Image (cartoon, rainbow, N blue to C red):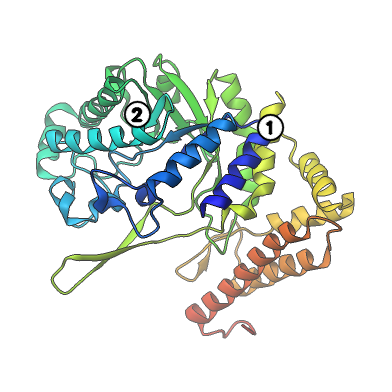
C-alpha cells in the first residue's frame, strides 16, 4: 500500500473502534543495520515514523510483526544469511541450532523495530515451521530431546530477547498446539495468538493444553486466506469464520482478537540461475487487494460490538441497504452471487463436494458476474465495482484454465 492509502485504511478502522494494528512489514521495512533485507518497495524511516505517529493520534497501537523462525524468505533469500538457513535450497526457515548467529540477527531487528514503534508488544511469528528438525544437527537434537524441546528452546531465546528490551512477545499458537510439551518454558509475559480460519479448534493439536497453559491468549480469524486468490474468494467461509470464532474467543476468555488479512500465500517459488544461486523468489498466490473486502471488515467490526454471534443474512441485508441502498430482494441475490460455487481447480479437476466440470463452474461464475452487473447500486457505486471486477477476473481465469487443461473442447469460450 502507498502511505496515503494505508493512512486512509487505518483511519477507517479507528473510526469503527479498532484500537490495534499488527503490521508485518517484511522487506518494505527500512532496516538500518541490515539494509540488504529491504526490497524495492521499502518505505523510508521518515514514512514509518510518520505513520506510527498518525496511528498514535488515532489511538491505534501499531504492533510490529517480525518473523523470526519460519516465513523468512525475504531475509534468507540473501546470501549474507545463507549460513543460518535450515535448508540450503528452501529459504523459509532459520536453523535454530545456529543459536548465536540467530540471536545477533534478531536482537538487531527487534531493536530496530523499537526505534520506530512504541508498542508494548513485538510479534515474533513462530508459525508453520515445517522444516523443524530438518538439518542434520537439528535432526540429531530432535532425536535426543524431541521436536517440542527444539522448538521451545529457540522460541524462548527469542522471547527472552523481547522481554529484555522491555516488550511483551506475541507468538502464533499453531506449533505450540502441535508440540505442547515444553510450552511452559516461555516467559510469563508471552502472549499466544490462536489463529483459526474456519476449522476445528483441535486442528493443530489438543486445544485444551493451550487454554490451560496459563498464558494470555488472543484470537485471530481471517478475511483473506487459503483458498483465496485474485481469482477466487470464499466469502461464505470467512463470514462463517467471523460468526463462529469471535463468540468462541469471548467464551474462552481471550483478551484480544486480531482480524488477519493475508496478501500472499506465504509460499514462494524459487528461480535459480545457471550457477544454482538464487535469482529470485515469486509468491505462489496473490489475493485481491484489501479495498475489495470492506464487507467482511465491516462484518468483523459489527461482531465485536455485539455479544451474540453474527447473523450473516441480517448483516448482509443491513450492509447492502446502508451502503448500496439495495432492497431485501437485491441483498439476497447479491449474497447468492458472492457465495456461489467457490471451488478451486487443481490439475484440471474442480474441487467441489459434488461432481462438477470446469465448464459447469464457468457457467456458475458467469451467472454470478451477470447478477452483480444487473443489480445497480443507488450509492456506493465505486466500491461495488470491486465485486464486479473480482467476478470478471474469476470468469476469465476459469476460461483460460479450461483451455489450458482441456483445449476448450467441453465448452465454448470467448476471452
* Quadrant of the rendered image containing residue 380: bottom right
Q: Is residue 139 left or right of residue 341?
A: left
**Nearer-the-camera pick, 268 or 68:** 68
Q: Is residue 88 visible?
A: no
Measured as percent of width and height from the top left, residue 45 is found at: 38, 45
Residue at point 76%, 70% (across, down):
370
Mark 2 neighbour class, 10 Å CA radius: few under 14, some 14 to 19, many 20 or more? many
Point out the tag, 2 or 1, that comes first from the N-terminus: 2
Mark 1 neighbour class, 10 Å CA radius: few under 14, some 14 to 19, many 20 or more? some
The dot on residue 176 is 2
Q: Is residue 373 left or right of residue 241?
A: right
Residue at point 53%, 55% (across, down):
228
Residue at point 18%, 41% (across, down):
95
Q: Secondary structure under badge 2?
A: helix
Measured as percent of width and height from the top left, residue 248 is found at: 59, 26
**Nearer-the-camera pick, 298 or 204:** 298
Disc 1: which residue = 303
Amino acid at each position: 500500500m502507498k502511505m496515503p492509502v494505508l493512512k486512509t485504511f487505518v483511519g477507517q478502522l479507528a473510526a469503527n473502534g479498532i484500537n490495534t494494528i499488527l503490521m508485518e512489514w517484511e522487506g518494505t521495512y527500512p532496516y538500518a543495520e541490515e539494509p540488504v533485507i529491504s526490497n524495492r518497495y521499502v518505505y523510508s524511516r521518515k514514512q514509518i515514523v510518520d505513520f506510527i505517529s498518525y496511528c498514535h493520534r488515532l489511538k491505534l497501537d501499531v504492533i510490529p510483526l517480525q518473523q523470526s523462525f519460519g516465513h523468512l524468505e525475504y531475509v534468507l533469500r540473501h546470501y549474507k544469511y545463507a549460513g543460518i538457513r535450515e535448508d540450503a535450497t528452501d529459504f523459509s526457515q532459520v536453523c535454530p541450532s545456529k543459536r548465536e548467529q540467530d540471536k545477533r540477527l534478531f536482537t538487531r531487528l527487534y531493536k530496530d523495530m523499537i526505534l520506530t514503534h512504541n508498542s508494548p508488544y513485538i510479534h515474533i511469528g513462530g508459525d508453520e515451521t515445517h522444516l523443524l528438525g530438518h538439518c542434520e544437527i537439528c535432526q540429531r537434537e530432535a532425536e535426543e530431546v524431541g521436536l517440542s524441546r527444539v522448538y521451545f528452546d529457540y522460541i524462548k531465546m527469542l522471547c527472552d530477547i523481547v522481554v529484555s528490551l522491555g516488550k511483551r512477545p506475541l507468538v502464533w499458537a499453531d506449533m505450540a498446539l502441535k508440540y505442547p510439551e515444553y510450552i511452559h518454558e516461555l516467559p510469563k509475559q508471552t502472549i499466544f495468538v490462536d489463529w483459526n480460519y474456519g476449522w476445528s479448534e483441535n486442528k493443530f493439536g489438543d486445544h485444551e493444553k493451550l487454554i490451560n497453559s496459563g498464558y494470555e491468549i488472543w484470537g485471530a480469524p481471517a478475511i483473506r486466506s487459503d483458498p483465496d486468490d485474485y481469482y477466487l474468494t470464499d466469502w461464505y467461509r470467512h463470514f462463517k469464520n467471523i460468526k463462529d470464532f469471535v463468540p468462541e474467543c469471548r467464551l474462552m476468555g481471550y483478551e484480544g482478537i486480531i482480524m488477519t488479512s493475508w496478501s500472499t500465500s506465504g509460499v514462494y517459488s524459487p528461480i535459480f540461475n545457471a550457477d544454482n544461486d538464487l535469482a529470485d523468489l515469486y509468491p505462489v498466490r496473490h489475493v485481491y487487494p484489501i479495498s475489495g473486502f470492506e464487507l467482511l471488515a465491516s462484518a468483523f467490526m459489527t461482531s465485536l460490538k455485539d455479544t451474540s454471534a453474527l447473523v450473516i443474512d441480517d448483516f448482509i441485508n443491513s450492509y447492502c441497504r446502508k451502503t448500496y441502498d439495495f432492497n431485501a430482494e437485491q441483498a439476497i441475490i447479491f449474497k447468492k452471487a458472492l457465495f456461489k460455487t467457490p471451488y478451486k481447480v487443481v490439475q484440471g479437476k474442480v474441487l467441489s463436494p459434488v461432481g462438477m466440470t470446469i465448464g459447469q463452474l464457468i457457467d456458475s461464475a458467469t451467472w454470478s458476474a451477470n447478477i452483480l452487473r444487473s443489480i445497480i447500486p443507488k450509492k456506493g457505486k465505486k466500491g461495488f465495482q470491486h465485486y464486479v471486477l473480482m467476478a470478471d477476473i474469476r470468469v476469465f481465469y476459469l476460461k483460460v484454465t479450461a483451455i489450458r487443461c482441456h483445449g476448450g473442447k467441453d465448452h465454448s469460450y470467448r476471452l
